[in-house]
Image: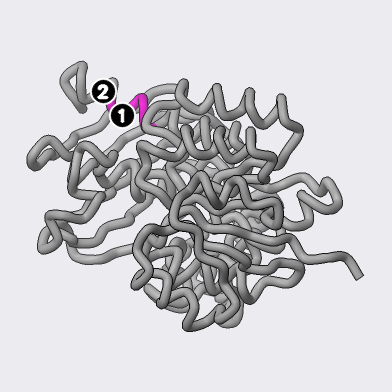
């Protein structure tokens, strides 16, 4: 039997405590072994589901731990590249939260470090591991809706009541595009295999932070419209509109939390629905990462994939600088 991959987490982020920590603990071939935090009380939330967890009081100490094979990095966006490179240089495989960086070019040194060390480094883009997305992409590529003409994307929530949230602070890389634009843009690119030719964006800011963006983009063979916001009623939806039908995902990004994972196929007056109630994309993500580490299996979302999504977001920033839509 192959020994499990021993994981450490850099930082006691809420998301790590509620989602990724339990996912690592539950995943086949993985062992959640250590956490780095200078706050003992924050560690207790992790020990509630992983009693044997070792706790280091600094990130450096965890990276120096010889009993750790891989690290998960849920730090603020602006720290992702630095600590990912430091982890690789310490001999650890890296799964880093999205977005990897605030600009596409900032990812290049991390790609170089991955290639130099020969270790696995990837963005934690969990949706590509979910069977609803794999089913949707198979439908699209098999011609279920004919030629794709348009993609419509929505991902919104309202966190205005939490001004100290890192998403509401410019110094920690806040904004709806860094936080959730990676989903609307990245899922479109992953589904279609195309890159945008032109992006125009209408952006609303509060206290220097982008809180709502309405984006229009032109791809080689289809058009795209997308809305991301941290100031609107929660909504998630992805719609792929073709000549002969429509593929619609109603809980595309927080499956099982926002709603049940399902894919609708509309053709004429007929609607067929495939549901995926049991899948946990965080667990599936950890297991896929483990296969890449142990067996060299290609990971379905590379740093180059992440760079492409960031390049699309960069085009939105450039559009704002040029006067918007």
Q: For numbered disc 2, what is the local secondary structure?
A: helix
Task: Name the dominant secondary structure of the magenta segment.
Answer: helix
- The residue that label 2 is drawn on is 319
Question: What kind of element bears circle 1?
Answer: helix
Residue 187 position (above or below residue 119)? below
Q: Position of residue 291 (x, y in %)?
A: 78, 56
Give me the residue at 42% from left, 56% from top.
11
Residue 81 as seen in the image, left or right of residue 320: right
Magenta segment range?
Answer: 313-317
Q: Residues within 10 Å of mark 2 (few under 14, many from 20)?
A: some
In the image, 18 versus 38, the foreground residue is 38
Q: Where residue 256 sits: x, y (%)?
A: 46, 77
> Where does residue 21 sit, x and y in percent of width and height?
52, 68
> Disc 1 designates what residue?
316
Task: State whether residue 303 is above or below residue 115.
Answer: below
One can see residue 292 in this view:
yes
Q: Would you say residue 159 sits in the magenta stretch?
A: no
């Amino acid at each position: 039997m192959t020994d499990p991959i021993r994981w450490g987490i850099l930082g006691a982020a809420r998301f790590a405590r509620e989602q990724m920590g339990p996912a690592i603990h539950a995943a086949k071939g993985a062992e959640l072994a250590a956490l780095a935090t200078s706050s003992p009380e924050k560690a207790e939330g992790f020990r509630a589901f992983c009693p044997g967890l070792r706790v280091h009081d600094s990130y450096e100490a965890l990276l120096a731990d010889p009993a750790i094979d891989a690290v998960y990095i849920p730090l603020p966006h602006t720290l992702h590249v630095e600590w990912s490179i430091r982890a690789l240089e310490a001999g650890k495989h890296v799964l880093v939260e999205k977005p990897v960086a605030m600009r596409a070019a900032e990812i290049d040194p991390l790609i170089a470090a991955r290639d130099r060390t020969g270790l696995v480094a990837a963005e934690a883009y969990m949706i590509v591991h979910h069977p609803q997305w794999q089913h949707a992409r198979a439908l699209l590529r098999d011609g279920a809706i004919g030629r794709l003409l348009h993609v419509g994307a929505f991902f919104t929530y309202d966190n205005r009541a939490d001004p100290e949230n890192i998403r509401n602070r410019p110094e920690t890389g806040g904004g709806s595009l860094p936080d959730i634009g990676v989903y609307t843009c990245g899922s479109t690119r992953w589904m279609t295999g195309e890159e945008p030719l032109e992006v125009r964006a209408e952006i609303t800011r509060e206290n220097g932070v982008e809180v709502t963006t309405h984006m229009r983009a032109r791809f080689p063979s289809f058009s795209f419209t997308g809305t991301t916001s941290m100031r609107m009623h929660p909504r998630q939806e992805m719609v792929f509109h073709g000549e002969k039908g429509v593929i619609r995902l109603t809980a595309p990004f927080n499956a099982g939390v926002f709603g049940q994972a399902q894919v609708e196929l509309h053709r004429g007056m007929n609607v067929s629905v495939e549901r995926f109630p049991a899948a946990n994309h965080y667990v599936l993500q950890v297991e896929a990462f483990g296969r890449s580490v142990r067996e060299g299996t290609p990971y379905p979302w590379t740093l180059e994939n992440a760079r492409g999504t960031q390049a699309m977001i960069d085009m939105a920033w450039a559009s704002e600088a040029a006067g918007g839509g």
